[in-house]
Amino acid sequence: MRVLVTGGAGYIGSVLVRILLERGYRVRCLDRFFFGFDPVRDVEDDVNFEVVKGDVRFVDGSVMDGVDAVFDLAALSNDPTGELDPEKTMEINYRGRVRVARLARKHGVERYVLASSCSVYGFQDGLLREDSEVNPLTTYARANVLAEREVLPLSDGRFTVTVLRQATVYGFSYRMRFDLAVNGMVRGFFKNGRVPILRDGTQWRPFVHVRDTSRAFVKVLEAERELVDGQVFNVGSNEQNYQIFRLAETIADAIGLPFEYEWYGFPDHRSYRVCFDKIAGTLGFKPEYDVRRGAREVYDALKDGRLDPDDPRTITVKWYKHLLEMREFLKEIELDGVLL
Ligand SMILES: NC(=O)c1ccc[n+]([C@@H]2O[C@H](COP(=O)([O-])OP(=O)(O)OC[C@H]3O[C@@H](n4cnc5c(N)ncnc54)[C@H](O)[C@@H]3O)[C@@H](O)[C@H]2O)c1
């Protein structure tokens, strides 16, 4: 069975493609490689792995040839990046994903899984379930909601669509992200001996490890069609809803250093807790990792040099900003006829 993973060289994608390969799937990775090729370099020679360098907005339908399932992860992947150029965010995260889903259906692909986010719930009281009202507060979250609404009705007897609303992810990846709460806290601790905490620390957020969310995609792929057809699942676990201050304490304790911290930002009143009963009950999904283990894993990788805390590509919004500036710069020098 061949799985097309869009965004396969990203933070989640680069872990997911390895899990698929380990389980014997053939994998085709479609990516613009905005963060470079390194995240998939060491699987490049695997006979079951193929790379297509392309853009979900324009790629030719032949990318679906021989594909049985699509995991659609390509996106500008967080709120601040989504605001750099809201129109591009809509083009990629909304219309690009709908395009991929339609191409998949047209080419006889059987399953399509959309990588959505719990951020669609916005910030609300109570425990949010898949049928709770959505409340998208940013371009990124709005694009997710629009994509979900347009891909779900594409489900028919042959084509199975599933939406995974992932909690905030953490843990080691081959394209590392230190702009995610747990990873950023560990990095701060490693660099300065203090955990950075966004004020005022009482806000709730749900978390899931990168290998666990990857396993959720595989669970959906391997589940009976009736269980996942046209379904939305929150991906995470009830125990990993954390208040941010408590999260920081947990991380310090797991690493085994005195709990020193520093505040940053304005008081963040954006708070939400998510219920993960549906994925546990329907698919038997249970995370193998918790925040303590994930934090230690990232800390160890920083300590032994497998992760560089100052790699500019690890702060997603900064890196995209840099790419946009470079594009402008290249346009300028091209116009002036100085270079290129
Ligand atoms: N990481 C999280 O905490 C989290 C939480 C919820 C949902 N998600 C969603 O999961 C998916 C993957 O997230 P991630 O953390 O791996 O992000 P990421 O930024 O690390 O990876 C996204 C990948 O998509 C590629 N890409 C971007 N635009 C593209 C385009 N137009 N065509 C082809 N490739 C393109 C990038 O080069 C990158 O490799 C995203 O859809 C994201 O919104 C992530």
Image (tube, rainbow, N blue to C red):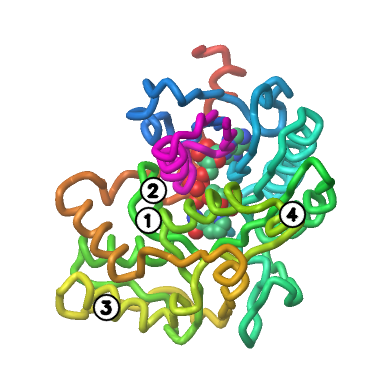
Relative to 16, is 312 on the left or the right?
left
**First in sequence: mark 4 vs mark 3:** 4
Whether label 3 touches label 1, CB < 8 Å: no
In the rendered image, which quarter contains the N terminus? top right
Whether label 4 touches label 2, CB < 8 Å: no
**First in sequence: mark 3 vs mark 2:** 3
Q: Amino acid at mark 2?
A: Thr
Local crowd at mark 1 within 10 Å, few (<14), some, or many (≥20)? many
**First in sequence: mark 4 vs mark 2:** 4
Residue visible at 37% across and 82% down in the picture: 245
Residue visible at 80% across and 56% down in the picture: 149
Residue placed under numbered mark 2 in the picture? 314
Local crowd at mark 2 within 10 Å, few (<14), some, or many (≥20)? many
Relative to 94, is 71 on the left or the right?
left
What element does badge 2 sit on?
helix
Q: Position of residue 154 (x, y in %)?
A: 83, 46
Residue placed under numbered mark 1 in the picture? 178
What element does badge 3 sit on?
strand
Q: Using the image, determine if residue 49 lies above or below residue 138.
A: above
Q: Residues in magenta?
A: 1-28
Q: Is mark 4 within 8 Å of ligand 1?
A: no
Residue visible at 33% across and 52% down in the picture: 172
Residue placed under numbered mark 4 in the picture? 229
Q: Is residue 77 visible?
A: no
CA gap between label 1 and label 2 equals: 5 Å
